[in-house]
Image (cartoon, coloured by chain):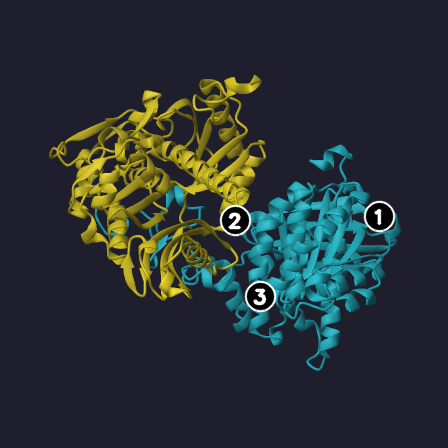
Chain colours: A cyan, B yellow
Amino acid sequence: MTSKETGGALAPDRIAAVGVGGGGTHALEAMCEAWRNGPRVIAINTDAKDLQAVRVPDKLQIGAAITRGLGCGGDAKTGRMAAESSARDLMDRLKNLDLVFVVVGLGGGTGTGAAPVVARLAHETGALVIAIATLPFAFEGEGRAQVAREGVQLLRDEADAVILAPNERLFKLWPPGTPAAQAFREADVMLGMGVSAIWKLLVRRGVVHIDFATLRSVVRASGGTSVFAYGEARGPERAAQATRMAIESPLLDGGVVLRHAQSLLVSIVGGPDLTLGEVETVMEGVRNASRKDAHVFMGAALDPQWGDTLSVTLISSERWSPEETAPAEAEGPDESISALAGRKKRVKPTQAQLGFEPVSKGLFKDVEPTYLKGEDLDVPTYIRHGVTIER
Amino acid sequence: MVFSFLLGPTGLPPVVALEIGTSKTVALVGEVREDGHLVITGLGEHASVGVRKGEVVDFDQALVCVRAALAAAEETGQVAIHQVHLALSGNHIQTLVNRGTFPILHAAAGITPEDVQQVTAVARAVNLPPDRQVLHSIGQTFYVDGERVARPEDFEGAKLALDMLILHTKRGQVRNAVKLVQSLPVEVADVAFSGLCSALAVLTPEQKEGGVIVVDMGAGVTDYVAYAAGMFAAAGAIGLGGDHLTNDLALAFRIPRAQAERLKREYGCSPSDAGHGGRVNLPPEVGYPARSINLRSLHVVLQLRLKEIFQIVRSRIEEAGLLRQIGAGIVLTGGGAGIKGARELAEEVFGAPCVVGRPIGFSGLASVTDGPQYATAAGLLRYAVKTEADSKRKTGGGLVRRLFGN
């Protein structure tokens, strides 16, 4: 992999973050403002006016012939066509890259439609693609939620890894009277944080290095989708504080996701004064908050410009599936479903919720089950038919 | 021509079929003789790793198997493989029938070939969810003003309709398989449903005319395809297969899977040799002591599973309203066809005669033309030759028409 060629870290000039649609470009803008010397940033939108207002040096308007410089009006098909029609321009911007972040707010037309195309094109030029996407707030309506769900499916087909930030979870951060405009703004900032955290994880030559393969294995674990959380603090108690902020982040559902995650990745970025004791504090905090048998990967990086700040980023696998394709799982001992139920009812989740395997499936215990009329056919027929076998 | 030695006897380059199955990966090289006969000149085979229920789950491991199979096929076939046709199966395969209608504006002039083309295009255009992809669209029946007709060009009417059977699957599955082959790097010319391929390999026109069900039982997936009155009537795939038989045995008798696999192959579920109280002795294996198991129990475990698989196929065919139209019976093929007693069991479940289907109309490597386990790959060769000929004819015709007006 590329990481080997450059001696452990990816070359920064061969990485780009591509913001697609309104949500994606604004998130990158927020990231650029908060933090200089980041990755190359490219803003892509169909809406010329919106694109002009974004303070990002490299911009590309797509599908001018299709939308006449306006937005897509929430139609993902138009967004896809816009991107396909500008495929050549996109390819020009995306070539000579090793790693591309596709940053998008799903639910709208341009983002949902164009992001999978951008991911595909980036992939075709030979880059690895990480898609980082927000899911719309509930108040945005079921229509947008549906569009976003389809967008996730398409992104998962095209990108090497998909990391999600469900906006709805951010709600708990703010008092009830928060204006909608501010909510969107904060969601964009959160998305930007996620990009920069993952970027740092891969680019900064770490004390304990993490390569893309590790990130991907976490993100791909259990075939689900991943979420991330970010925390930072300074001062004498910074390690404990940053860890708490990340663990209790609303994006991890206040820690519920973490307690069910099968694998997670912890990234610690600090200044030159980062101590081993602090790394230990962070890891202990994370381990206490996660499942006993979870696979925990750790990376630590030093950034001279970081000063006395310490930041903790958690990337955790979360089983997520569109409702319509998982009717059978709803009845089973599915961890994520019980986790969601646990959130609503505020029941303290315990180990008992993990359930147990009632009947053996042998060879098929880790593969997608073959269901027919609610029956798991991977379980031996003689067991389901209740036939006693004389051995 | 310098490179003419690379071409087959008819001047066509050899075609290559690749099937990445659950238990084995098969690559076949075929050439077309002057009389249209397919000669199988190369065979590469490798045990599959990283494939479950017909789908690639471990990219790197599967890649090794595909590479080995293709290399062996290159060696035996004495060709360099740059392009393959790929067979696909899996639990995600689904079908739907889409009726396309097209108004005939010039009713008095009769229905023209252009109208037929138009209605075909309309019937082909289905709206699938974004994660689904069409694998095949196969025309079934034409209707002129609601009346069923065989050849619409012979009729006059105001409305032309066509029923199109659309076979679709998960987009990601196709992409993964294609990506795998492309990373070798080898081009993928086309993908085809493995059940359809098997049917192309083992059926005669008479069987299709009489009505027949092809059941291709692989290790991970059982495909089925039904023909009625010469027409492609129904198809599907169930994520159950020979591996389930092995797994059931392993769990029932608490024996290692390799031993269960051997027992399955050797004893099967044939009711004839299920002597009462007969026992099979098992040698000791690492972690498992030597022991003996009840032969009748072994048959019962296998019978229950096989019967269930056949019953699911039967109920699907019944739902499609085709069960009464199956005059030519059942053709059982794939690795599962080799299990003792499977044929008799299928006859019992379907209440129709059942034969084991082997590739017909092929010559060349005898092991291929004799074995039901190669039906898919052999049929895929036929599919490849057929589609290539079709596309040639189409572009040729178009060119001629363009050159000479009309």
Mark nearest the camera among 2 and 1 is: 2
The chain letter under disc 2 is B
Mark 2 and mark 1 residues within 8 Å of each other at the beta carbon = no
Viewer-nearest residue: B29 or B249: B29
Q: Nearer the viewer, residue A145 or B140?
A: B140
Residue B28 on image: x %, y %: 42, 27
The answer to whether residue A32 is above or below residue B258 is: below
Residue depicted at 20% across the width and 48% down the height: B326
Q: How busy is the neighbourhood of tag 2: few (under 14 within 10 Å), some, or many (20 plus)?
A: some
**Residue wearing tag 3:** A147
Q: Which residue is mark 1?
A: A303
In the rendered image, which quarter is residue A390 located in?
A: top left
| Label 1 – label 3 distance at C-alpha | 39 Å
Residue, x 47% and y 59% (percent of image)? B128
Q: In the rendered picture of this protein, how many numbered marks are placed on residues?
A: 3
**Residue A245 visible, this orientation:** no
Q: Quadrant of the rendered structure where residue B373 is?
A: top left
Depth check: give the residue in front, A148 or B371. B371
Rounded to the nearest whole Å, what is the CA distance between mark 2 and mark 1?
39 Å
Q: Is residue B27 above or below residue B208?
A: above
Q: Which label sits on residue B172?
A: 2
Q: Residue at x 65, y 41 (%)?
A: A213
Query: Residue farthest to the bottom?
Result: A177
x%, y% of residue A231? 74, 60
Q: Position of residue A31 (x, y in %)?
A: 80, 60
Q: Which mark is residue A91?
A: none
